[in-house]
Image (cartoon, rainbow, N blue to C red):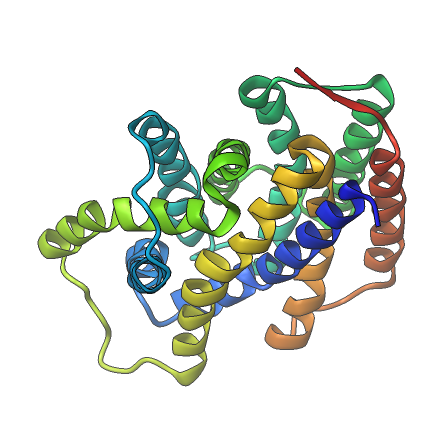
Amino acid sequence: MTRQNIGYIWGMLGVLGFSLTLPATRVAVLDIDPLVVGLGRALIAAILAAILLSLTRQPLPPRSSIPQLFIVILGVVVGFPLLSAIALQTAPASHGAVVTGLLPLATAICGVWRAGERPSVKFWLSAMSGSMLVILFSLLSGSKSLYISDLFLLGAVFAAGLGYAEGAILARTLGSWQVICWALVYSAPLLAIFFIFHGFPLPHYVSNSAYLGFFYVSFVSMFLAFFAWYLGLSIGGIARVGQVQLLQPFLTILASAALLGEKLRVETIFFALCVGLCVLIGKNASVARQ
């Protein structure tokens, strides 16, 4: 099996883990403060990361990597979870999945900017076609207007794309799971200070489904899924493997239909197949690295 295919396999495992993030967040914010859901997940994951780093006796990251770790923190530990949790107070999970379908294109752009990757024209055509299909799907689904929640989601997309690219660069030297673990550990003091002043408010009643959603985004979305995702990006390339995430909106919509009772339509399956074809074309396109 080629190195590129191995990267795709790890990337797909990461996307499968991420695909339930928006439905789980949507369920959690119904009963739990979105700030708690958005930032509390990282605090829970930071505890798990500290335990894992301690058990495996990992050396401290070199000082030169600290600025990059803070970019990862701003992107995927704080930016995406917080902005998406705020947006999903009013937006359905399936709509959030459509907007975040632009994430692979943002990841590819950040890969060019931060990692020096140089995708071919064929790659950009496939990536843009996949993104345009996602936007067209959004328009046909009735999302014809831009709402405040969409602005938060677009901010989450940019933050995640930058965090993915920077984390993938670091994974080549620190290791895939070590990157997210150290990012979580370094962010823990800032998160703890925030919750000391803000408090950790919980309503009198929190449903079991809300607790389960919060557990999922803390343990899987914020922790385990990143192990596979950063490994896939670092092995197969940020731009190329990042295109696998074009399939995430459709996996999320499928999960939303199964878990939240949101409607699943025939056109969703059709667009998912078309986007899958774009991912396959992008997989075979050349991407040079400086």
Residue 54 vertical placement versus 194 (above, below): below
Asked if residue 44 lies left or right of residue 238, the reply is left
Asked if residue 223 lies left or right of residue 116, the reply is left
Q: Is residue 188 visible?
A: yes
Q: Residue at x 58, y 64 (%)?
A: 20
Residue 279 vertical placement versus 110 (above, below): below
Q: How many marks?
A: 0
**Residue 85 x, y percent position in the rendering:** 41, 54
Q: Residue at x 34, y 25 (%)?
A: 64
Residue 245 vertical placement versus 116 (above, below): below
Q: Along the line of sight, which residue is nearer the eye, 107 or 31?
A: 107
Task: Place residue 34 in its image quadrant.
Answer: bottom left
Q: Along the line of sight, which residue is nearer the eye, 233 or 103?
A: 233
Q: Quadrant of the C terminus?
A: top right
**Residue 223 x, y percent position in the rendering:** 45, 59
Q: Residue at x 83, y 34 (%)?
A: 282
**Residue 118 x, y percent position in the rendering:** 71, 17
